[in-house]
Image: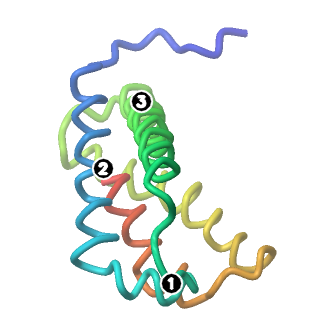
Amino acid sequence: MNLLPAVTINYTAVLAAGVVSMVIGYLWYGPLFGKTWMKLSGMKEMGKKDMMMQSYVITFVGALVTAYVLSVFLRLTGSTTLSAALPVAVWAWLGFQATQLLGSVLWEGKSWNLKTSGVNSLYYFLGFI
């Protein structure tokens, strides 16, 4: 069983998607909804700078993995245009990310408002798009 499908991946696009995801995250959890997110998360202040850098790096790697996997999905479905790719991204978000967010609300005691108010769920939705 070969886990790496024989598809051509545009690594420049994957890298660009990772960078765009970080920019969206900076804007989303900074000037746009940072205060709301911190309030709903119960955070009083951001963590230490050395820990934040590690978190940024790990988040960026996660964004690259997400972009790569979504790229594989798009290739496997033959989605070569934006109009064909958007439904794949929406269904991938709904089937994988949204259900994980729901699980964290139900089983981890995370705030329903934080997960469903648009702060986290819409950020991840934009990331898939």
User: How many numbered marks appear?
Assistant: 3
Q: Nearer the viewer, mark 2 or mark 3?
A: 2
Q: Secondary structure at mark 3?
A: helix
| Residue located farthest toward the right when viewing the structure as drawn | 107
Of badges 1 and 2, the one in the foreground is: 1
Going from N to C along the chain, the mark reached first, 3 or 1, is: 1
Residue underneath mark 3: 68
Q: What residue do we see at 47% from left, 33% from top?
A: 65
Residue type for callout 1: Lys
Along the viewing direction, whichever of 53 and 48 lies nearer the viewer = 48
| Disc 1: which residue | 44
Pick whichever, 12 or 94, lies toward us.
12
Q: Please say if the residues under marks 2 and 3 sit with CB atoms less than 8 Å apart.
A: no
Look at discs 3 and 1 and give the one toward the viewer. 1
Q: Earlier in the sequence, mark 2 or mark 3?
A: 2
Residue flagged by tag 3: what amino acid is it?
Answer: Tyr
Q: Is residue 114 above or below residue 101?
A: below
**Which quarter of the rendered picture does the C terminus lie within?**
bottom left
Q: Position of residue 78 (x, y in %)?
A: 34, 29
x then y, percent, for residue 111: 63, 86
